[in-house]
Image (cartoon, grey):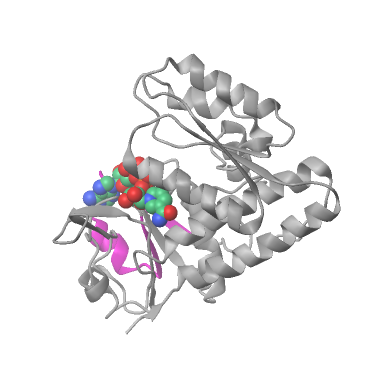
Amino acid sequence: MAEVIDGEAVAAEVRSGIADCVDTLASAGARPGLATVLMSDDSASETYVSMKQRDCEEVGIEGIHVDVDADAPATALFDTIDDLNARADVHGVLVQLPVPEHVDRRAVLRRIDPEKDVDGFHPENVGRLVAGDARYKPCTPHGIQKLLAAYDIDTEGADAVVIGRSDIVGKPMANLLIQKAPGGNATTTVCHSRTADLEAKLADADIVVAAAGVPEFVDGSMLKPGAAVIDVGINRVDADTEKGYELVGDVDYDSASEVAGAITPVPGGVGPMTRAMLLYNTVKSAGRRHGVDVTLP
Ligand code: NAD
């Protein structure tokens, strides 16, 4: 049976290190602040934002939240971003995605001050990541790098398959894995909805990062024995529960854990790490802004 990669435990360690960074900043008279902006009535987005605010509180980061009416013109969101960009007490600005259809998502990401872009989605930060000079690594792939390191899963020379090519997960994950740097140096294949023969790619993969948003579509029969399997997917499927649904990953956990060497559960794997790395980027930003050398976890 595969070793279970405990994202809750690793995230708790990261958060403890971040609380130390907050103390260091406080001794220098600075308090890190993270602003979240929600322009949506979607319940999942509301939940994500409130979890991020709760996380801030737990480690001593000042949480600021702004709601923008989902029907408001795009300029209302841009004005909010401009205000937060200008505020000295705000070190991170995060606009919860997706934004409504009448708002240009790319324009939103470009509007955020790259120094406060703690999601790492501004084109300047994407460029820096690709160039191997990341300012803020995007939270989900960065969290995955930390998980792999925590479990001594060596990426160097490994064959890695990333399933999914989104700007949020797939592409930055692949970019991190190919960097000539710790947590990189993997021979990386990016698979997506038009990949001709996913099974053939997976058969050789030492590390699989599944981020397709398709419930349980990777099963044990597709994996190389001993592979490290990182399940990013968070899919709501109908179930006989109080809420009427349950959350499952992109990997069929039961069959995969019989073949894999290590595997992340859903929930409790990648999700907590994504949240922790947002706090990481926020204290990093505050350290940069105030010239304080925080020792990041
Ligand atoms: P997305 O929809 O933007 O991208 C999905 C990608 O998967 C696309 O590039 C598509 O080409 C590829 N794909 C779709 N079907 C495929 C198939 N059958 N075979 C191969 N590739 C296929 O999604 P995203 O934002 O990257 O998120 C992916 C999943 O991860 C979702 O379930 C999302 O909820 C979850 N997610 C989790 C976290 C976390 O912290 N755990 C963070 C972000 C996203």
Q: In this view, does 67 lie to the left or right of 71?
A: right
Q: In this view of the protein, can residue 196 be seen by the observer?
A: no
Q: Is residue 210 toward the left or the right of residue 82 in the image?
A: left
Residue 227 x %, y %: 37, 74
Q: Where is residue 129 in the image (x, y as percent from the top left)?
A: 60, 44
The N terminus sits in image quarter: bottom left
Relative to 66, residue 213 above or below: below
> Residue sitting at 23 percent across and 61 percent down?
216
Comparing 293 with 211, the one in front is 293
Quadrant containing the C terminus is bottom right
Res 232 → quadrant: bottom left
Judge whether 224 appears above or below 180 on screen.
Answer: below
In the rendered image, residue 20 lying in the magenta stretch gets the answer: no
Q: Which residue is drawn at 37% across and 67% down?
A: 205
Residue drawn at x 38%, y 24% is 70
The boundaries of the magenta stretch are: 187-210
> In the rendered picture of this protein, how many numbered marks are placed on residues?
0
Q: Can I make out residue 4 in this image?
A: yes
Rendered location of residue 62, percent (x, y): 65, 45
Residue 196 colored magenta? yes
**Coordinates of residue 46 in the picture (x, y in percent):** 40, 41
The residue nearer to you, when weighing 188 against 251, is 251
- Measured along the vertical axis of the image, is residue 44 above or below residue 141? above
Please, is residue 225 above or below residue 54 in the view? Answer: below
